[in-house]
Image: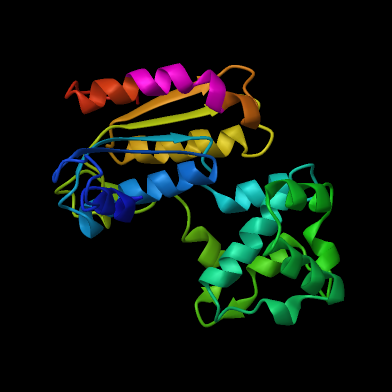
Amino acid sequence: QLDMARAASRVPGAGVAKAPRVALAGYSEGGHSTLWAAQLAHGYAPELDIRAAVAGAAPVDLKATATNLNGGLYAGFLADSVVGLSTAYPSMPFRSLLNPAGLRATDDVRTQCLAGTLATWAFRRIEAYSTDHLTLEQIYAIKGPDGTWGQVIDAQKVGVGVGRPGSGARYEIGFPVLDYWGSIDDVIPPASQAAGAKRLCDAGIAVRRKEFALGVHATTIVAASSDVRGWLGARLNGIPDAGNC
């Protein structure tokens, strides 16, 4: 997202100011990338005038999300995540752990769109695809050049090593964040989302937390759309928000 914001002001004829006000926003895996963009912005793109970030239904704790997805209707999202992590960390053990079904399945994931992956993986468990029928916990214990798989996955957690500008924290966030989720999200555990928002709050970040009653993963983005537009508009117009931590 940070590179896209940089590029937008450099595209001839795009009508974007050279130094525009920027807002970060995303939902689900996009919410996760939004929060990471917020954490990285101060060090990676300090020239951007970021006014706010909005993250909805973000998988801020991948271990909690994996446990929820494994064997469920949306197990395809777990398959996507596993393949994505193996691509991001090519030195870590992966294909050597897979049985023939696992090799075929992960190759398929790389070429399928969302609907195909969800249909193929519905109610399947990750244990069926490794040579030793490894559980998630056993996979987390496997070591490689980048540490254990558990350490690699924990490194993706949002809200760790975060602080306000000038705090000396590894990641500094100096703009307000709207973090929202559905109370009965069936993909990303609501408790993990609330815990992620609390970590940001505890770090002193101005977080506006909102849980939408009876919201599942597919509906909360719609239920929140009006609130998101209004909140972002206010931030881009210079109206502060101290959050509701």
Residue 6, compared with residue 244, is above or below; it is below
Question: Is 165 on the left or on the right of 88, as rendered?
Answer: left
In the image, 168 versus 3, the foreground residue is: 3
Residue 242, compared with residue 93, is above or below; it is above
- Say how the picture is coloured: rainbow
- Where residue 120 sits in the image (x, y, percent)? 82, 53
Indicate the quadrant containing the C terminus: top left, top right, bottom left or bottom right. top left
Q: Which residues are magenta?
A: 221-230
> Is residue 226 a member of the stretch shown in magenta?
yes
- Where residue 95 sits in the image (x, y, percent)? 71, 78
Q: How many marks?
A: 0
Residue under the point 22% across and 55% down: 45
In the image, 14 versus 34, the foreground residue is: 14
- Where residue 74 sits in the image (x, y, percent)? 74, 44
Residue under the point 57% across and 52% down: 62
Residue under the point 47% across and 22% down: 225
> Is residue 82 a member of the stretch shown in magenta?
no
In the image, 226 versus 126, the foreground residue is: 226
Is residue 175 at all visible to an observer of this figure? yes
Q: Which quadrant of the view contains residue 208?
A: top left
Is residue 67 at all visible to an observer of this figure? no
What's the magenta bit mostly, secondary-structure-wise? helix
Residue 33, compared with residue 57, is above or below; it is below
Farthest residue, direction front: 13
- Where residue 30 sits in the image (x, y, percent)? 48, 44
Residue under the point 81% across and 47% down: 119
